Image (cartoon, rainbow, N blue to C red):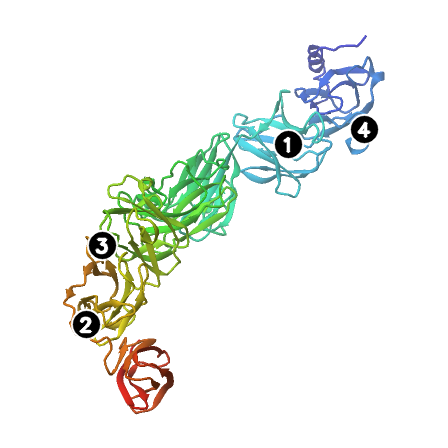
Amino acid sequence: MRTFIPFLFLTLFTVASSAAQTARVQFIQNSPGPTSVDVYRGSTLFFNNFTFRTASPYMDMPAGDTINIGIAPKTSTSASDVVATFPVVFDSGKTYIVMIAGVIGATGPTAINLYVKDNAHETGPANGVDVTVFHGSPDFPAVDVDALWVTNNLVSNLSFGRYTEYVTLPPDLYDLAVQSAGTNNTGVTLRADLSSLAGGAITVFASGYYLASPSLGVFVAFADGTVVKLLITPMARVQVIHNVPESPVDIYIDSLRLADNFAFRRATPFLDLPADRELRLGIAGPESTGPSASVASFPLSLQTGKRYVLMAAGIAGATGSSALNLFVKSDARETGSASGLDMMVFHGVPDAPAVDVDAVFDADNVISGLSYGTFTDYLNLPAAKYDLALQPAGTSQTAASFRADLSTLSGKVATVFASGLLSQSPGLALLAAFPDGTVTEFNRTPVARLQLVHNSPAPVLDIYAGNTRLLDGFSFRTATPFADIPADRNLTFRAAADSSTSSASAFASFPVSFNTGETYVVVASGIVGAPGPKAFKLFIKSGAREQSSIPGNVDAQFFHGSTDAPEVDIRLPGGAVLFDNIQYGEFSGYQSASAADYKYYLTPFNNNDNILGAYIAEWSQHPGEAVTVFASGYYSGVSPAFALWAAFGSGVTVPLPPVAVPTSEPAAQEGISVWPNPATEVVSVKMYVKESEELTYRIVDAGGKTLQAGSFGQVNAGAFSETLSVSSLIPGVYCLQVSSGTGILVQKLVIQR
């Protein structure tokens, strides 16, 4: 029958023997195999069924003599069942910890053993807690332990079976990061609340198996024999974004350097930080030596399991609302929805007013009234290419527009933040921070320049770009001024009747795409509801001009926008054809001429003697401008009647006043005409030839030197036209001479650039 010695007996025994030489000893049972043992002192059962991860209180033990401590299975009936015996001698007046560790039946370093620590502490200083750590996991490698936010290297390279020396810690809440020795790879972080233990001493011991059962844990043994398990530190997930327009900074959480030389407009990945305790985030200059160098610090309290974005923003040294601050957003996300991008937006520009944000041509008022220092809730935007226009709140005036290509970000999540300063460097920017710490800066929206001309004899129109109403109440024969339009993306222009409620009311839609830096004129022409070539349509001209190519001149192009008018030419009196063979829906090239008033004759393309209409182009009031002349209305006389109109870059449109058609005006007279004159790159040479003959030409300077010469070849009798390149001539005054067998015709030629 097994002998059982009650704990009361042990207590009486120790009291009775206190007069003898004694030591103070605490026993801790940390052998995982088996998890309960019987401990014999000589032939006497000392601890019956001593359970794994339990401890005795400190007790008096005889000193000066050898004591044989035997370990037996918990089923033992006597000391004869002991499987391992360890002689120990305790010195009088000393304090010891005796740790039973290792495995019964194992050999080598992990065999069952007693690990004795002398100079143990039963108490600590009045204002501190004395801590020793024992590595008692047989299959776990050597470890380092950091007391996060307090001290690194609390424990260094502690291997199985070893104790640390005591360290005195202030009574506080600690998070102990256990790492494989020599690495920064934290295996586990454990919460140790020592805040109520001033004057005490504890033994922290690793216990169990890393790769088997019972599994690894870390426990604390108190002097009274109480053993508690350290639980895993409750964590929150945190991303820090540096949005202070400063040089790199160091970021501290309490005493831990979280980010070193952390650059402006950069982000950490989401990190685990201890929750349910008070922390302090400090911001210091680069190369700082510790948190005491922080120029600003902010209290931080995180809740278990939550996610946060911490945005450092403001201006270092400023006061008031622009001062350096830490803006905290809880309920942040690391993963997005099944489709689209989940995006929250932060206004981080201290000197900017509250803003609205439109996804240009996709959705108005995506964000309304976002003020500095605030986050939006998450928005879900379909994965596509957007132009995000920032506007002072309550206005439609875009301060800046940024191209956000989200087309590859379906299922992702991001924090989009406005950054920089309006009034000085660094300038305004818009960026997106992703959970892995990647930061993407959005480029300014690439733009083209665009003028819209309404030339359809239709009702007043509403024009939409995408889902955005671009023009409201756009009237026949009016135009917009040239304005920026997002380039390098696919858009859809839609036309709807006036007073439409949305783009869904459109009766026609047209896919368009504009190239960065180019200039366009888009003419809406045709008949609403008509089929075929006369149907309502947008006609697009690239290479448009907002001003003349030659200072002081007027550059004019022609658009044929009358659905029932024939193919036409426009010529000057005397026969020079400005715009040649233009049919419905076509644009001509530009012609540059001095800012004067010209008479335009409209003729059939194959009969310049037949003048269909005469108009005055009053260009004298528009030096330096470019103009689109457009044929408009019905040639057949149906209302609205045919007319020529002019659209200037400012958006002003005016009709060209009609004048009486001359009764006798030859299409070509004897002599030579050059257009344009002054010229830049090319000139059109026109003349009337009485009979078939060979023509040659040369261009001479004021001194008579021939600079360019050539032959027009054998030409037939009648009207003759040819184009010459003059791009090799420097600006100046020249003489064009055209020769035949019967004589020479001469015309002054001016080159301007």
- Of 339 and 644, which appears nearest the observer? 644
Above or below, 478 relative to 179? below
Task: Tell me the mark number nearer the camera, choosing from 1 and 4.
Answer: 4
Residue that label 4 marks: 106
Residue that label 2 marks: 596
Q: Tag 2, which secondary structure?
A: loop
Task: Tell me the mark number nearer the camera, choosing from 4 and 3.
Answer: 3
Residue 206 percent location from the top left of the image: 67, 30
Residue furthest toward the top?
1
- Is the C-beta separation of discs 4 and 2 under 8 Å? no
Which residue type carries mark 2?
Ala
Report, in whole angstroms, how far the alpha carbon at label 1 lies from the one at label 4: 27 Å
In which quarter of the view is residue 617 placed? bottom left
Which residue type carries mark 4?
Ala
Q: Residues within 10 Å of mark 1 (few under 14, many from 20)?
A: many
Mark 1 or mark 2: name the one nearer the start of the chain: 1
Residue that label 3 marks: 478
Residue that label 1 marks: 132
Mark 1 or mark 4: name the one nearer the start of the chain: 4
Mark 3 or mark 1: name the one nearer the start of the chain: 1
Residue 572 percent location from the top left of the image: 22, 73
Which residue type carries mark 3?
Thr
Does residue 693 appear to the left or right of 7 in the view shown? left
- Of 326 and 420, which appears nearest the observer? 420
Q: Tag 1, which secondary structure?
A: strand
Q: Residues within 10 Å of mark 3 (few under 14, many from 20)?
A: some
